[in-house]
């Protein structure tokens, strides 16, 4: 028997799918090459003989968050989302370059992106000044920014309003409060807070993401029946966006994209080219110098990952499947 379903949890190749009636089944992909991630809509087949559910096909994805693996290939993180929420906190100390790379992946994938500063209850003078400056730069770049605290409830109503009608994913470094926020927003008591996404050797454990439906909030919305949904993601030490998915000219930096209109060359990479409007904007302070440094680093990463593919795959063929 065949049916369509959505992947609502993925622990590596161990999947939970939910059918149209809302019934959940354990399932696994049929065949090594089939990679399904949380959020994917899939075709399933019931293997009556072994009482198993097989995922036989991943249906086309509307949007997908892609990361690069060490060989320069693209891997899906979560699928069919519409919004990315990147979290930062005073502790662990924010790495703005990771935040930037998530935001570039979001811009390039056509996702709305929100920057949420969590644990504002823990801010001191120094971390307040650092995070204020960071959020100001992101806000200038056109991203939505919010501040709050999962443990004290501040900013949660405002965040909830932004989630309405969206399929959102929470991303960010381990310990910033992703699980705490999901628990807070879904009133789910079973979510592991403070759980390390690593095993005893410090290796990251199998990718685990889960999808949670959000009950319609009382906030005035166009469609009050659609509360949206939320996906979590395991903590990361680093994040590299999939290089083929990035906007070629700006790599997904909205400020660079805007400034590039005035570069002398259409294919300007904003590195050493004469008449580069992006570099000129750094000189005058119109473009934040740290964001430009981040852009340059992502260019280097792009080159390194392209080289990592080796000569045989340089034709750019890549797979979004694992
Ligand atoms: N003070 C404070 N601690 C928080 C807040 N949110 C989360 N935490 C704590 O930060 C730690 C990591 O949280 P967790 O949700 O597991 O982070 P994750 O790794 O991003 O999922 C836990 O000890 C939480 O209790 C907050 O708003 N304020
Ligand atoms: Mg967590
Ligand atoms: Zn340029």
Image (tube, helix red, strand yellow):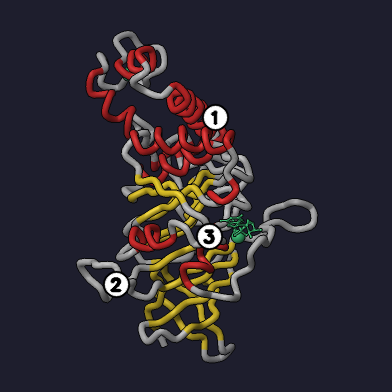
Asked whether disc 3 touches disc 1, contact meaning CB atoms under 8 Å apart, the reply is no
Q: Position of residue 252 (x, y in %)?
A: 37, 36
Q: Residues within 10 Å of mark 1 (few under 14, many from 20)?
A: some
In percent of the image, x 32 and y 65: which residue is there? 164
Question: What is the x, y in percent for residue 209?
Answer: 54, 64
In the displayed structure image, the side of residue 47 where residue 42 appears, left or right: left
Q: Is residue 204 left or right of residue 75?
A: right
**Residue named by callout 2:** 226
Residue 42 is labelled as none
First in sequence, mark 3 or 2: give its number: 3
Nearer to us in this view, 176 or 119: 119
Q: Which residue is mark 1?
A: 304
Residues under labels 3 and 2: Cα distance? Answer: 23 Å
Q: Is mark 3 within 8 Å of ligand 1?
A: yes
Percent x, y of residue 297: 51, 27
Q: Disc 1 and disc 2: Cα gap in Å?
A: 42 Å
């Amino acid at each position: 028997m065949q049916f369509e379903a959505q992947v609502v949890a993925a622990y590596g190749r161990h999947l939970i799918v939910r059918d149209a009636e809302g019934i959940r089944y354990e399932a696994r992909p049929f065949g090594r090459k089939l990679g399904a991630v949380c959020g994917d809509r899939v075709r399933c087949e019931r293997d009556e003989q072994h009482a198993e559910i097989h995922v036989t096909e991943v249906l086309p994805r509307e949007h997908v968050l892609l990361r690069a693996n060490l060989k320069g290939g693209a891997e899906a993180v979560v699928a069919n989302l519409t919004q990315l929420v990147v979290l930062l906190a005073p502790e662990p100390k924010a790495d703005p370059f990771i935040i930037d790379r998530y935001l570039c992946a979001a811009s390039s994938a056509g996702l709305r992106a929100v920057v949420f500063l969590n644990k504002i209850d823990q801010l001191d003078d120094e971390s307040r000044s650092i995070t204020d400056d960071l959020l100001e730069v992101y806000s200038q770049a056109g991203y939505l920014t919010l501040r709050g605290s999962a443990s004290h409830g501040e900013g949660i109503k405002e965040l909830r309003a932004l989630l309405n009608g969206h399929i959102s994913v929470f991303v960010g470094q381990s310990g910033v409060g992703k699980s705490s926020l999901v628990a807070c927003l879904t009133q789910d008591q079973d979510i592991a807070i403070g759980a390390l996404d690593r095993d005893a050797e410090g290796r990251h454990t199998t990718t685990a993401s889960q999808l949670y439906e959000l009950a319609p909030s009382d906030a005035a919305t166009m469609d009050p029946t659609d509360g949206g949904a939320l996906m979590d993601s395991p903590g990361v030490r680093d994040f590299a966006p999939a290089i083929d998915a990035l906007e070629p000219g700006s790599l997904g930096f909205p400020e660079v994209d805007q400034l590039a209109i005035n570069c002398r060359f259409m294919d300007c990479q904003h590195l050493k080219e004469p008449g580069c409007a992006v570099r000129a904007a750094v000189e005058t302070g119109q473009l934040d110098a740290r964001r430009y440094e981040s852009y340059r680093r992502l260019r280097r990463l792009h080159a390194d990952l392209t080289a990592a593919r080796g000569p045989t795959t340089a034709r750019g063929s890549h797979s979004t499947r694992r």
